[in-house]
Image: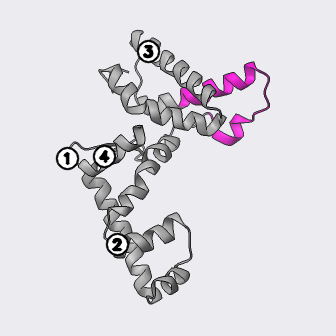
Amino acid sequence: MKKECCNINEVVKELYNYLKSYIFGKVKDKTLADDIVQEVMVKLIETHQKSKDIENIKAWLFQVSRHTIYDYYKKHNLDFNIENDWNIEDESGSEISKIMVSDYVIPMIKMLPKDYAVPLMLSDIDKIPQKDIAKQLNLELSATKMRIQRARTKLRALFVECCHLEYDRQGNFIGCTIKDSCEPLHNISKKLNT
């Protein structure tokens, strides 16, 4: 763990709410989610005190969360097929990407100029076919496709501008940390944490 973090409090502060949301999404019970996230935090502190090396703390935390949920269901003889639903052996961080990035995608799309934000939202979030978007926005299909493509490029640039992007050794995206200079995302983050 020393390789990636020096301050356990910062790790807890940064990831606690993400883990809690992730766990709640799996167990659909607020009290149980609170209990499980506390158990995961205890495991984190115990591992930190033993000075064990963890190369990717975020992936490790989400893996421990999956195992802790699985253990709870197994201990209480509840029917729950975690392996098929969650790929329990997967340490790629894809769950992390979904949790961390999904919280910011829609607010960041809304930060784009309206001419780009609206078609991108309709296409990539609402999953409306581009020909229907063209009709709805009274645009030619080619103009609609161009706006959506440009919006994706602008959104990608906004992520690079506002976030320290993190990749694993294979080059797969695993998460992002908001840069100090990106006030709009810090405001969004504060809202998500309350």
Q: Residues within 10 Å of mark 3 (few under 14, many from 20)?
A: some
Q: Residue 176: which quarter of the image? A: top left
* Disc 2 to disc 1, C-alpha distance: 23 Å
Q: Amino acid at mark 3?
A: Ile
Q: Residue 27: which quarter of the image? A: top right
Q: Amino acid at mark 2?
A: Lys
Instruction: Name the residue that disc number 1 marks.
Output: 181
Say whether residue 46 is magenta: no
Residue 63 is situated, as x and y percent measured from the top left of the image, at 55, 30
> Does residue 176 appear in the picture of this structure?
no
Instruction: Name the residue that disc number 2 marks.
Output: 114
Give whichever of discs 2 and 1 has the lower sequence position: 2
Asked which secondary structure carries label 4, the reply is helix
Give whichever of discs 2 and 4 has the lower sequence position: 2
Choose mark 4 or mark 3, whichever is in front. Answer: 4
Q: Amino acid at mark 4?
A: Asn
Instruction: Name the residue that disc number 4 marks.
Output: 187
Choose mark 3 or mark 2, whichever is in front. Answer: 2
* Disc 3 to disc 2, C-alpha distance: 45 Å
Residue 121 is situated, as x and y percent measured from the top left of the image, at 46, 67
Q: Amino acid at mark 1?
A: Ser
On screen, residue 143 above or below 36: below
On screen, residue 161 above or below 5: below
> Looking at the image, which is closer to me, 47 or 8?
8
Q: Which contiguous range is marked in magenta?
A: 63-88
On screen, residue 143 above or below 158: below
Asked which secondary structure carries label 2, the reply is helix
Q: Residues within 10 Å of mark 4 (few under 14, many from 20)?
A: few
Instruction: Name the residue that disc number 3 marks.
Output: 45
Marks 4,3: beta carbons within 8 A = no
